[in-house]
Amino acid sequence: MVVYDFQAKTIEGKEVQLSEYKGKALLIVNLASHCGFTPQYEGLEKLYEKFKDKGFFVLGFPCNQFGAQEPGNEAEIKSFCDLNFGVKFPLFSKIDVNGDNTHPLYGYLKKELPGVLGTEGIKWNFTKFLVDRQGKPVKRYASNEKPEDLEKDIKSLLA
């Protein structure tokens, strides 16, 4: 099983197969608009712009499970991202990343790359998973790791 085996709903409500990203390196991130880490949207967009022509995508998944910091609906989230950060990377519908209603993609990511001390749960907004061109998760980053600090790892997947 790989990331490309899953599907997700875009922020516009369209069901897509992640196999659309086959052969691309991905950074999958759970997002929130009212979080202390929200300025990372800017860094995520810069990474996307810098490496998209080399086969790299950021996939953003809004989530309201941490401090209710993503209370808006899809239209509000999309508008916020456009107006405040000029986000062009793909955004998806709001999901759960922990608990009984965990999105299957996140169930897979957490199982493949557990966090600190082997815990699978996502700790907070802006947890990042780097996925290689074969669709295998290769690295998990904590919320406080800035997008710009991931450049070296991204470049190694695109070489």
Image (cartoon, helix red, strand yellow):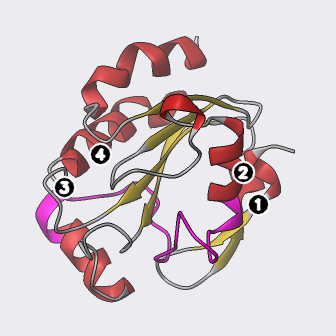
Q: Amino acid at mark 2?
A: Tyr
Q: Amino acid at mark 3?
A: Thr
Q: Which residue is mark 3?
A: 38
Q: Earlier in the sequence, mark 4 or mark 1?
A: 1
Q: Earlier in the sequence, mark 4 or mark 2?
A: 4
Q: Residue furthest right?
A: 1
Q: Earlier in the sequence, mark 2 or mark 3?
A: 3
Q: Are marks 4 and 2 in contact (CB under 8 Å)?
A: no
Compared with residue 101, is residue 33 higher up or lower down, i.e. above or below?
A: above
Q: Quadrant of the N terminus?
A: top right
In which quadrant of the rendered view does residue 6 lie? bottom right
Residue drawn at x 49%, y 83% as measured from the top left: 12
For the residues carrying marks 4 and 2, which lies nearer the camera in this image? 2
Q: Are marks 2 and 1 in contact (CB under 8 Å)?
A: yes
User: Which numbered dot is residue 108?
Assistant: 2
Q: Please give left or right for residue 136 compared with residue 30 in the image.
A: right
Q: Amino acid at mark 1?
A: Phe
Looking at the rendered structure, the secondary structure element under dot 4 is helix
User: Which numbered dot is residue 45?
Assistant: 4
Q: CA distance from mark 4 to mark 2?
A: 25 Å
Task: Pick the residue in front: 29 or 83.
Answer: 29
Looking at the rendered structure, the secondary structure element under dot 3 is loop
For the residues carrying marks 3 and 4, which lies nearer the camera in this image? 3
Residue drawn at x 34%, y 49% as measured from the top left: 126
- Mark 1, residues whose alpha carbon is within 10 Å: few (<14), some, or many (≥20)? some
Q: Is residue 55 visible?
A: no
Q: Earlier in the sequence, mark 3 or mark 4?
A: 3
